[in-house]
Amino acid sequence: MDKTVINTDRAPAAIGPYSQAIKVGNLIFTSGQIPLDPATGQIVPGGVAEQAERVLENLKAVLAAAGAGLEQVVKTTVYIKDMEDFGVVNEVYGRYFTKEPPARSCVEVARLPKDVLVEIEAIAVV
């Protein structure tokens, strides 16, 4: 098995014993991205829209470090703190996945790391 750890300083550093992403063959599995500013390590100011945008920018950075982009994503899982925010998150998400969007699951969760409002993970094929 050809397994490569993906790491970039253009996305937040892991806050535990995990990698930002793992590439195995032509598959990339990202860890969940949360709305931390990679420059400061702090949660971005604002509400769920700003957090969703930062999460997707972090996801783009991790994928780029693995040699991919959002257009190669085949599956995402979106975790949101409050399902009432689904419409806002969906609108932001739709701006990033405009053509042939990936399969997706979206679930409301009781709590996310650092009490953020949204987290997204992805699987991409290159």
Image: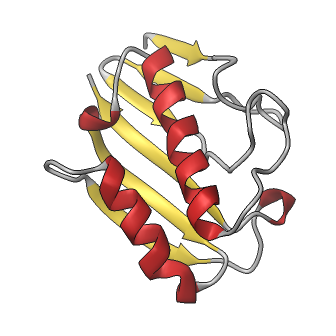
Q: Is residue 7 left or right of residue 3?
A: right
Location of residue 52 (image quadrant):
bottom right
For residue 66, side relative to residue 115 (left or right) = left
Q: Who is closer to the viewer here, 29 or 91?
A: 91
Please indicate whether residue 125 sits to the left or right of residue 6 in the image: left
* Residue drawn at (62%, 68%) of the image: 48
- Check the image and name the residue furthest to the bottom: 84
| Residue at screen point 45% across, 27% down | 63
- In the displayed structure, does residue 13 sit left or right of residue 21? right
The total number of labels drawn is 0
Q: In the image, residue 27 lies at what x, y percent?
A: 34, 27
Q: With respect to residue 39, does 105 lie above or below?
A: below
Looking at the rendering, in which quadrant would you find the N terminus? top left
Q: List x then y, in percent, for residue 49.
A: 56, 65
Residue at x 44%, y 45% (from the top left corner): 122
Is the residue 17 above or below the residue 66 in the image?
A: below
Name the residue at the front extreme: 46
- Where residue 99 appears, x then y in whole percent? 15, 48
Q: Is the image coloured rainbow, by chain, by secondary structure, or in one colour?
A: secondary structure
Which one is nearer the viewer's eye here, 110 or 89? 89
Please identify the residue farthest to the left as the structure is shown. Answer: 100
Q: Quadrant of residue 66?
A: top left
| Quadrant the C terminus occupies | top left
Instruction: Look at 63% across and 83% down and name the residue there.
Output: 82
Q: Nearer the viewer, residue 17 or 107?
A: 107
